[in-house]
Image (cartoon, rainbow, N blue to C red):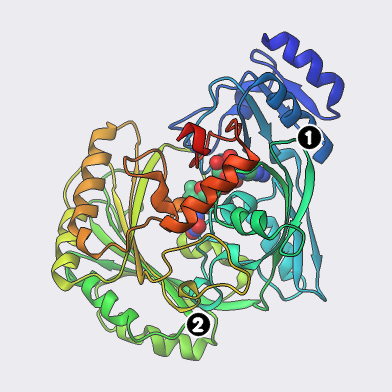
């Protein structure tokens, strides 16, 4: 069926907007925050409500087209080439039930709005480092948050998922209504339909002690090893990471960082400021700080801890979940992070464990919970050749290969690095998810994602 015929049918069925190539707004809506890829759909549906999503999925199923949802494009790695793009940025809104401690979050809502709405009731969601990320995409991929060691993965705190499944039915999925699908949705990404809203449990947090200490690595070359030693002393109330960044000498970076290898230790501590100061004291004692922003802050300012980029750009990233990192491996990773390159390559280690290591009350498919650290390589492309990014990725991840628990965190993979997609899940969960996918989406309509192909496609 050609594009015009598609549009005619959908325009009659959809209350929101239907855009075709060439229409005003089509190009803007098919792009996302990640600029290394762009969707090239044959049609974009901007729904006015779940019924419009039902119409879009029914149409795609009938025409044998693939479907994908996009909220912000922060995780855009598998662009549609033809097919139906459901632009969920039209479905926004947060309704907090303060008594239940939950929030119903519509599919296109960014965490910034969830954080603000929850804060009015002294509550907070389990968002990640960048509140500009879409809440639904983040939760579907597990959600490794600022307060992870205290409260676990964001997917552990989902009460309900409203979704349009590949059979074009709108359902509200809970642990009671459909335990299998509920388990799969919390960690199996976008494989099972277009989510129209989620109901999230909030936590009673309104202030944290947090920020970053930035070290000059030329003078503290063993920072990574010392950071790892420090993490072994910490309570679950403190979640942290360290990022090693070799900043090129370019005016776009702050003067104090240009041309330096810097180590950013980021902290979010749910205890009071005094205990935060005590816990941070051994790090501050290392000295050679380029900056220190650690302080008590309202949770609404949590985005300042990582101060992730706000401007759309191209980036590639990969990670590995680790049991441990030896001092020799820490030294080798630091050396690689400092290697000169055309762009600042970011190597970070996130401290896991605590509640991230425990199973949730209602099981989901976020696995590899025995991991104690996540090592990630992130390369903004800035016009530089992707080969450099790939060389860095391989070199850094190879350094710690013997420590892998055999898995990766799907949310922190950007682009399509080589490696088996199934290692986002435990092998038994992947087999089970394949069975569910075969039953619910045998034609693999939802394939432009970190895909779990149905058995016939495998
Ligand atoms: C700067 C930055 C910081 C980040 N920090 C963290 C972090 O600290 N912790 C963490 O866990 N992750 C983090 N992420 C990763 C981020 O959580 C994922 O990329 C997430 O998938 C983004 O969701 P989105 O809706 O914003 O992006 P999109 O690109 O719009 O969507 C990402 C994926 O989710 C699917 N999807 C989106 N909405 C729906 C829906 N309604 N129904 C079905 N599928 C849907 C899309 O099809 C796509 O496959 C970060 C990413 C960036 C770029």
Q: Does residue 320 lie above or below 386 as drawn?
A: below
- Give the vertical position of 416 relative to 360 (above or below): above
Residue 133 appears in view: yes
Q: Estimate how packed mark 2 is, as few (under 14), some (14 to 19) or many (20 or more) residues with alpha carbons within 10 Å.
A: some
Q: How many marks?
A: 2
Q: Is residue 389 above or below residue 333?
A: above
- Evaluate if marks 2 and 1 touch, with contact meaning CB atoms under 8 Å apart: no
Secondary structure of residue under mark 2: loop
Estimate the x, y position of residue 425 in percent, counting from the top left: 45, 55
Q: Quadrant of residue 87?
A: top right
Q: Kindly identify the residue that appears in the image at 30 percent across and 81 percent down.
A: 230
| Badge nearest the viewer, 2 or 1 | 1
Point out the image quarter for the C terminus.
Answer: top left
Return the residue at label 2.
237
Residue count near mark 1 (Cα–Cα under 10 Å), binned few <14, some 14–19, many ≥20: many
Query: What number is the disc on residue 54?
Result: 1
Q: Is residue 3 left or right of residue 347?
A: right
At which x and y percent is residue 174?
A: 74, 60
- At x 17% / y 65%, what residue is drawn? 329
What whole-number distance in Å separates the C-alpha atoms at marks 2 and 1?
A: 42 Å
Quadrant where the N terminus sits is: top right
Q: Secondary structure at mark 1?
A: helix
Q: Position of residue 133 (x, y in %)?
A: 58, 50
> What is the number of the mark on residue 244?
none
Left or right: where does residue 257 sit relative to residue 99?
left
Q: Confirm whether residue 71 shows in the render.
A: no
Residue under the image location 69 percent in, 70 percent down: 202
Is 146 on the left or on the right of 280, as rendered? right
Quadrant in which residue 440 is drawn: top right
Residue 205, image x, y percentages: 64, 77
| Position of residue 227 in the picture relative to residue 356 (left or right) | left
Mark sitting earlier along the chain (2/1): 1
């Amino acid at each position: 069926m050609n594009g015009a015929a598609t549009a005619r049918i959908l325009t009659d069925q959809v209350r929101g907007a239907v855009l075709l190539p060439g229409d005003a707004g089509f190009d803007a809506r098919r792009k996302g925050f990640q600029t290394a890829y762009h969707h090239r759909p044959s049609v974009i549906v901007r729904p006015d409500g779940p019924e419009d999503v039902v119409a879009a999925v029914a149409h795609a199923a009938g025409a044998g087209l693939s479907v994908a949802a996009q909220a912000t494009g922060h995780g855009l790695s598998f662009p549609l080439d033809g097919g139906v793009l459901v632009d969920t940025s039209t479905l926004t809104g947060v309704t907090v039930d303060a008594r239940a401690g939950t929030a119903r979050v519509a599919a296109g809502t960014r965490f910034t709005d969830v954080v603000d709405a929850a804060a009015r009731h002294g509550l907070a969601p389990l968002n990640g480092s960048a509140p500009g990320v879409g809440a639904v995409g983040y939760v579907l991929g597990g959600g490794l948050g600022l307060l992870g060691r205290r409260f676990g993965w964001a997917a552990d705190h989902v009460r309900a998922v409203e979704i349009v499944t590949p059979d074009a039915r709108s359902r509200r999925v809970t642990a009671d209504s459909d335990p299998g699908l509920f388990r799969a949705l919390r960690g199996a990404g976008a494989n099972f339909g277009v989510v129209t809203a989620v109901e999230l449990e909030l936590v009673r947090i309104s202030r944290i002690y947090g920020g970053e200490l930035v070290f000059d690595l030329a003078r503290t070359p063993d920072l990574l090893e010392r950071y790892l030693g420090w993490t072994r002393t910490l309570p679950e109330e403190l979640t942290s990471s360290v990022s090693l960044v070799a900043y090129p000498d370019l005016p776009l970076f702050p003067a104090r960082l240009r041309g330096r290898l810097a180590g950013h230790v980021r902290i979010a501590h749910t205890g009071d400021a005094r205990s935060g100061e005590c816990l941070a004291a051994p790090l501050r004692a290392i000295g050679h700080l380029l900056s220190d922003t650690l302080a008590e802050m309202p949770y609404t300012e949590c985005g300042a801890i990582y101060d992730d980029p706000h401007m759309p750009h191209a980036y590639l990233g990969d990670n590995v979940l680790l049991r441990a990192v030896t001092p020799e491996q820490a030294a080798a990773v630091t050396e690689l992070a400092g290697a000169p390159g055309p762009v600042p390559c970011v190597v970070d280690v996130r401290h896991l464990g605590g509640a991230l290591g425990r199973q949730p009350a209602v099981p989901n498919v976020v696995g590899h919970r025995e991991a104690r650290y996540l090592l990630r390589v992130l390369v903004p492309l800035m016009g530089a050749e992707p080969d450099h990014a790939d060389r860095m990725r391989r070199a850094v991840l190879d350094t710690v290969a013997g420590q892998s628990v055999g898995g990766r965190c799907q949310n922190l993979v950007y682009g399509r690095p080589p490696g088996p997609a199934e290692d986002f899940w435990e092998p038994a969960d992947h087999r089970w998810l394949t069975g569910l996918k075969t039953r619910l989406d045998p034609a693999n309509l939802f394939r432009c994602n970190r895909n779990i192909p149905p058995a016939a496609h495998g």
